[in-house]
Amino acid sequence: MTKHFYSHIVETSSISLALGDMEDLSAEERKHLIGLAEENLHHAILDAVLSELSEEDKQQFLLLVAKGENDKIWKLLLERVENIEEKIKNTAEALKKELHEDIDESK
């Protein structure tokens, strides 16, 4: 998983392990699906965060994300959004649950 500002509170290893259990996938297919899952998770978290910010804060947040300035991102989020860590965790858990259900369904 790429190091994102939320990487310390969101883990994706369970998705990787679940996809690893699918014997009918090639290594390349598995790697591709893990990448897609991580991208979906990233977009869901960005959407959740952006929905909590003002227009001005959204611009500042996106600039910081583009620069990879994780400490400054957290400073902004902790000042502007109440319970932001919990909101990110909840977003991630909901999507991971959905992905696990999809994986289980396809087995």
Image (tube, rainbow, N blue to C red):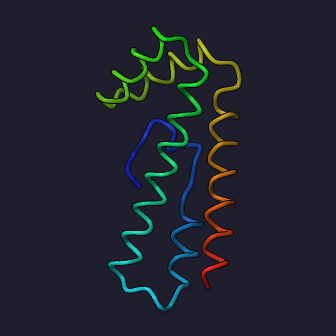
* Quarter where residue 104 is shown: bottom right
* Quarter where residue 82 is shown: top right
Q: Nearer the viewer, residue 69 or 46?
A: 46
- Seen at 59% across and 25% down, the residue is 51
- Seen at 56% across and 17% down, the residue is 53
Q: Is residue 71 left or right of residue 63?
A: right
On screen, residue 62 above or below 18: above
**Where in the figure is residue 54, as x and y percent of width and height?**
54, 11
Q: Quadrant of the C terminus?
A: bottom right
**Where in the figure is residue 59, as x and y percent of width and height?**
40, 16
Q: Quadrant of the N terminus?
A: bottom left
State the residue lying farthest toward the left: 67
On screen, residue 79 above or below 47: above
State the residue lying farthest toward the bottom: 24
On screen, residue 87 above or below 19: above
**Where in the figure is residue 60, as x and y percent of width and height?**
40, 15
Q: Nearer the viewer, residue 20 or 97?
A: 97
- Seen at 54% across and 39% down, the residue is 45
